[in-house]
Amino acid sequence: MRFSNLRGAAIAVLPLVAFAACRSSAPVAAPAPAPAAPVAAATAVRTDYKSGDELVAAMHTRYHATWYTTLAFKQKTSTLLDTAWRVQTWYEAMRIPGRLRIVFDSVNSGNGVLYARDSQFVVTNGKVQRRDAGINPLLLLGFDVYGNLPAHTSALLRKEGFDLSHVHAAEFQGRSMIVVGAARGDLRSKQFWVDAERLYFVRIIERSRRDSTKTQDTRFVNYQKEGDAWLAARVEIHVDGKLTFHEDYSDIRTNLVLDDLLFDPSRWRTARSWITQ
């Protein structure tokens, strides 16, 4: 599932010299130069957040009125298996906040995953095989943070195991970041990173669920503007520094009309599809 360049200042300079025609033989002084227009001050990048709650509130305030409410895309999914990559095509549709449908294998396979009602539903051949309580933290931090009330987002983050009392500034790939969940220099504890200027989600670092001795680093990259919002067109997972999984998006559409039944697990096959061929 997945926002890149802003701001500059320009100086407008008025003509420095203007002469008026005069019939008199007496010398005429040129008028004084007009003052240069003031330089617009660059917007300060804030890095002094006192808590994760404060950062979540700032993210919501920045984009809640302009963020897209629905999103769909085609996804090229690449998974490293030993030394070879397995490539699949998935399709995703999202309604913010809290609903995400992922279709696996093929358009008509009937296989996939649905996130809705604070639960995850695993679907095989069009039927729900398993339901687990829980949310998708990438959906929460990458998208729902702009649709939920901040207090609700913070409550869900705490439930997911993030310590919102630990906040510090850092640098990542040449940009200023706000890190929530760990002390400075700690790259093992569960934490999330947010771009300090643009206030979009960048990465989660945590212990690998498959092997707790390893560190998993999930990143949203290749951000692009979508109106007055952002979208990361690629997601990467690095385990102990090695790229093991990535998703690349195409046919990206925002604010499209989606059938409500797409997010009803019992109507997996009968909901109106959004997928274009």
Image (tube, helix red, strand yellow):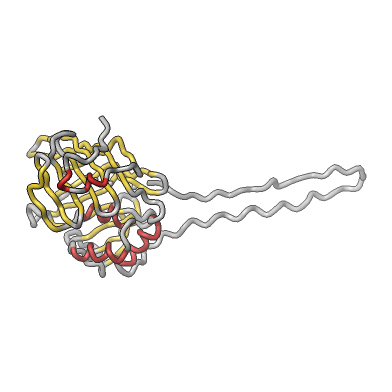
Residue for point 12% across, 54% down: 208
25 or 189: which is nearer to us? 189
Q: Quadrant of residue 156?
A: bottom left
Q: Which residue is most to the top?
A: 277
x%, y% of residue 273?
24, 37
Residue for point 21% across, 41% down: 271
Q: Is residue 87 visible?
A: no
Count of residue discs = 0
Residue for point 60% across, 55% down: 38
Is residue 197 rendered to the left or right of residue 141?
right
Residue for point 19% across, 43% down: 102
Is residue 30 rendered to the left or right of residue 206?
right
Q: Is residue 91 above or below residue 263?
A: above
Q: Quadrant of residue 18?
A: top right
Q: Is residue 45 above or below residue 107?
A: below
82 or 108: which is nearer to us? 108
x%, y% of residue 196?
36, 57
Quarter of the C terminus within the rendering:
top left
Q: Is residue 29 visible?
A: yes
Quarter of the N terminus within the rendering:
top left
255 or 182: which is nearer to us? 255
Q: Quadrant of residue 178?
A: bottom left
x%, y% of residue 24?
92, 45
